[in-house]
Image (cartoon, grey):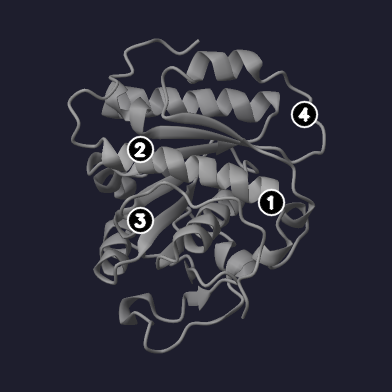
Amino acid sequence: MTNVVAFRRSPKIDQPEHLSAIVVAGSRGAAATTTCFGLATALRLGTDAQVAAIDGTFGGGNLLDRAGVEPIDSARAIRQLGSRMAVSSAGAVVVGHGESSDSVLVDSLLADRNLARIHDVGTAVRSRRLAPLIEAGAAIVVATAPRAEPLARMRSALEWLIGTYGRDVLPRTVVSISHQLPQCVVDLAPIRDALSPLVAAFVEVPFDATLARPGTVDHRRLSVASIDAWTDVLDALGRIEAGRHDTDRRTGAGELA
């Protein structure tokens, strides 16, 4: 397997193996699965770190089908995860959904192997099983599409996070807008202007025909612009990680527009 792909720069994360982040879908069809795959890919390519992309969606998702291209070596397998492990084209570990999966247990098992963890939780951010991860300070990526209904649901998700965990959740939240059509039909400027001062980053991932196709995704077919955008998200996650214990960090005291 070759990992040769056009790559602009490495993400700015001092200790990528310590990263634990959840990708939240503002609504169904928000590209949380491909965002999780993309972040894991960009981190793996950019740092050569061991990375895991984890399907933690409620009721099951298709991350393993989309990203797992070959069985994992038995030496890297984890008994508790059974047969739900594979390797992506970039060499990231992909963990499929399990009906009884405990998100904290899965995160702990992978952390013990020194793997960075990107959890795709879909619309299940309100699930009580995710609360310990969020309360422990996991970074949050809210993924949505640039259409009216998904954007409205994204706002609802942000307001729920604030209402449940307090306004300090905003400075460790990244908003990722995934363009699913070649042209954007919504003016994102007002939303960007309103959110950028409050959240860790507001990043637009351009339309990528490779992601729009069904079936398994090979990272070597991704556009450079997509990898660049995911690297921008990772840079923000790196700043969150670096500033977790910084008392001078932003408090996110503003109001959502």
Q: Residue at x 57, y 49 (%)?
A: 35
Q: Tell me, yes or no, if residue 118 can be seen here.
A: yes
Q: Height in image: 19 above or below 24? A: below
Mark positioned earlier in the residue sequence (2 or 4): 4
Mark 4 crowdedness (10 Å alpha carbons): few <14, some 14-19, many ≥20: some
Mark 3, secondary structure of its residue: helix
Q: Height in image: 38 above or below 44? A: above
Q: Residue at x 55, y 14 (%)?
A: 193
Q: Are dots 2 and 1 in contact, CB under 8 Å?
A: no
Mark 1 crowdedness (10 Å alpha carbons): few <14, some 14-19, many ≥20: some
- Front tag of 2 and 4: 2
Label 1: which residue? 224
Percent position (x, y) of residue 231? 53, 46
Label 3: which residue? 16
Q: Are dots 3 and 4 in contact, CB under 8 Å?
A: no
Q: Tell me, yes or no, if residue 24 can be seen here.
A: no
- Front tag of 4 and 1: 1
Q: Quadrant of residue 163 in the image? A: top left
Q: How far is disc 2 from disc 4 in space, using C-alphas?
A: 29 Å
Q: How far is disc 1 from disc 3 in space, using C-alphas?
A: 21 Å
Q: Is residue 64 left or right of residue 141?
A: right
Mark 4, secondary structure of its residue: loop
Mark positioned earlier in the residue sequence (4 or 1): 4
- Front tag of 3 and 4: 3
Q: Which mark is residue 184?
A: 4
Q: Amino acid at mark 1?
A: Val
Front position in the image: 200 or 186: 200
Q: How far is disc 4 from disc 1 in space, using C-alphas?
A: 19 Å
Label 2: which residue? 239
Mark positioned earlier in the residue sequence (2 or 1): 1
Q: Height in image: 213 above or below 254? A: below
Mark positioned earlier in the residue sequence (3 or 4): 3
